[in-house]
Amino acid sequence: MHRIAVLAGDGIGPEVMTESLRVLDAVEAKFDFTTERTEALVGGAALDATDNETPLPKATIQACEASDGILFGSVGGPKWENLPPDIQPERGALLPLRKHFGLFANLRPGVCLPSLTHASPIKNELVPDGFDVLCVRELTGGVYFGTPKGREERDGEPVAFDTMVYKKSEIERILHVAFTAAMQRDKRVTSVDKANVLATSVLWRETAIEVAGHYPDVTLDHLYVDNAAMQLCRRPGSFDVLVTENLFGDILSDEMAMISGSLGMLPSASLGSKKEGTDLYFGMYEPSGGSAPDIAGQGIANPIAQILSASMLLRYSLGEGEAADALDAAVARTIDDGLRTGDIATGAEGETRVGTREMADAVIERL
């Protein structure tokens, strides 16, 4: 019995979560395991229920603490944008959840299936077979969290400053996540840094070389971040696993999402510490896109990112790798068979336009 916390959130979150859970039901039946699910409020939904007191109620945190992993929807929308910043859905729910559970590793796949290369802004001749890249981003260190940071006046003018800082132990743990992931893929890791300029990157590169010694089957290479950004546009199919620090990962993972063609297809995982005695992580799994309030309730949202987030939950937190493989394959077959929600539809011959529920039905059928 696996225990998961289900936090559907706002906008299209509840409707794509419903379909993700229906798909999960089918996966459980096929692979003979069960999940105990606890639904809890988060984001704008929690604010509405608590008279704008909090986007992250204590009961929600407790539900997450009692789980093996969190299946997260999307939060936020115009309705709550005028609230004080510290209780707005994104800042008041997502960041505290990451901090509370020590979610230091962000995994974002950048996948463009062969049948969707037309949706990528990359020229088709550069990605004739699509691509599958995994970006592993350090999530709790670097310039976003380093101190001191602030503003002051120097010589009669305003000055702002931030501090980029990394401990070796922080670098080691994210690199181990990347190398472990590579062992389940094509066994190639590209470490991205700026070691020609930054002292933190020199330590990063030294540590990457050291950690690579523990994984003799994995090939390690290095790229400066500016070159990595260019090569993702020139030859995305040449990468397997990218690993990098917080700021660089923030930028590169968004670039990967853009060249993949649709955020509606891309999941993500934020992982914390390994569970004692296992190779499984406690993590939070969510679509890479937002809550899309403009299409909420219309039954047209793409549920694939939420479905694939459930697949990552199966793989990294529940230890159901075979089930995750089957689910990923079912999604790929669904797209190969021409089923399209509006965000990935082009009107080309052989496409079938479907809504949220129909897309999930098609994935279930192909399981």
Image (spheres, helix red, strand yellow):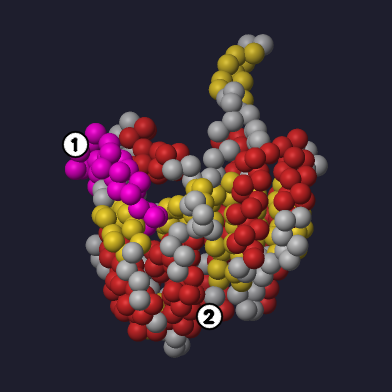
Q: Nearer the viewer, residue 345 or 254?
A: 254
Q: Which mark is residue 51?
A: 1
168 lies above or below 28: above
Residue lying farthest front? 277
Between disc 1 and disc 2, whose residue precedes?
Answer: 1
Residue interval drawn in magenta: 45-74
Residue 127 is at least partly visible in this image = yes
Label 1 and label 2: CA atoms lie apart by 46 Å
Q: Secondary structure at mark 2?
A: helix
How crowded is the residue under tag 1: few (<14 C-alpha within 10 Å), some, or many (20+)? few
Give the residue at x 32% y 77%.
29
Q: Inspect the image, locate mark 2, and give the three-letter code of the amino acid beneath it.
A: Ser
The kind of secondary structure element at disc 1 is loop
Say which residue label 2 marks: 115
Task: Between residue 276 and residue 273, name the one nearer to us.
Answer: 276
Which amino acid lies under the numbered mark 1 shown in the image of this protein?
Answer: Asp
Q: Is residue 310 magenta?
A: no
